[in-house]
Amino acid sequence: MNKNSIIKNKITQLEKVFQVPARLRIMSVLMANKKADFSELIEMLELTRGNLSMHMKMLEGCKYITIKKQFVNRKPRTTYHITSLGKKDFIMYIKMLEGIIASSKVT
Amino acid sequence: MGKKLSPQKALKDLSTIKNTIDRATGAEIFTNFIYSTGTLLAISGLVVIIGCIANYHFIATFGPTAAIKKAMIIMWVSISCLIGLVTLIMFAIQGKKHNMGFFSYYRHIANKAFLQIDIPLEIMCAIFIILFIKMRHYEFIIPACVIWIAVLFTSLGAVYVEKSFAIVGYIFLTCGAIGLLFMSHMQLFFVAGVFGVLPVILGLLMHGRYKQIREKHIAVLNPSDNRKEGAPPREE
């Protein structure tokens, strides 16, 4: 596989992952706070539990986040942490967006 | 390869990212700001109490000689500088905690809305202080400074819609008015009360308020905490 096709694949992957605004917002929260609880994300992003779980599974599948489940005061607590790959790809996506905007201004 | 992103979609995505990050960091910054303000008030109050005790002790022991007065002025200037330095350090620590430089953090707290309310009132206070100096009514300078602080807190309360700041502001405002009207001949007592004891109490109350906000936040975030006893734990 040559370099161009690797880049194209990466861009396709980024577009696929971040085309959904909810996933973009989840990653933004994790970028800002490094970690967040499930309930915290629900409150902040105003998503349903099922919806958030689904997006989290998708992000975990991409290795963008890690999930830590524990019991605090006998109550379950799920915490999500952003991985270094998640950070790297999110920054790459932002740069890509900036690039698109900049190129549209030039043309 | 999927459909190419349009510039409009790119702009929308960037705006979504910015708004979400602002929202994610904003609440945390503000609650920490309440906590650090409380700490700052308590520390400065303790330092001022020590200063007042020292001032009283030296005047009572050696009498109000010129040398002692000069020493007291140096002491109070040092105390003011120390409190200023602690404030700057706290700003820097808080900024670092939120991945911001000192000035970014300052700009975040002292935003445009805050400055629009605060600056005209502070200029008014400054004019009064200059007026008192020109009229040689030095006894009114300290109460005017108290009103200056009150203006700062009430402005913070108005901008951030936070009652703890507003209450602290109104308490200082009342104390400043009492100082101007009735306590011009009890300077040291007034300073000890308003800059010493009061900030310690208000600082501790602000810590309480911080805990209250945090607990409220956690209660909202974890509705499972309020579930009926015996019900299965529910999260996802």
Image (cartoon, rainbow, N blue to C red):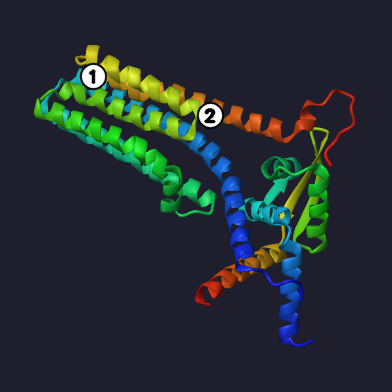
Placement of B13 over or under B37, stated as above or below: below
- CB contact under 8 Å: marks 1 and 2: no
Q: Residue at x 26, y 22 (%)?
A: B143
Mark 1 vs mark 2: which is more N-terminal? Answer: 1
Instruction: State whether residue B49 is above or below residue A32.
Output: above
Residue nearer the viewer, B95 or A102: A102
Q: Which image quadrant is residue B28 in?
A: top right
Mark 2 neighbour class, 10 Å CA radius: few under 14, some 14 to 19, many 20 or more: many
Q: Chain of mark 2?
A: B
Identify the residue under disc 1: B187
Compute the Cα span from label 1 to label 2. 29 Å
Residue situated in front as seen by the camera: B153 or B55: B153
Which residue type carries mark 2? His
Whole-percent x, y for residue B127 in the image = 19, 32
The answer to which image quadrant residue B129 occupies is top left
Q: Which residue is mark 2?
A: B207
Which chain does the residue under circle 1 lie in? B
Pick the residue in front: B43 or A44.
A44
Which kind of residue does numbered mark 1 sit on?
Gln
- Of tags 1 and 2, the one toward the viewer is 2
Label 1 packing within 10 angstroms: few (<14), some (14-19), many (20+): some
Q: Secondary structure at mark 1?
A: helix
Is residue B155 among the parts visible in the rendering? yes
Task: Name the residue rendered at 75%, 47% in the picture.
Answer: A79
Q: Left or right: B49 with respect to A31?
A: left
Residue A73 or residue B78, whichever sits in front: A73
Q: Is residue A42 left or right of residue B130?
A: right
Which residue occupies the extreme bottom position in the image? A2
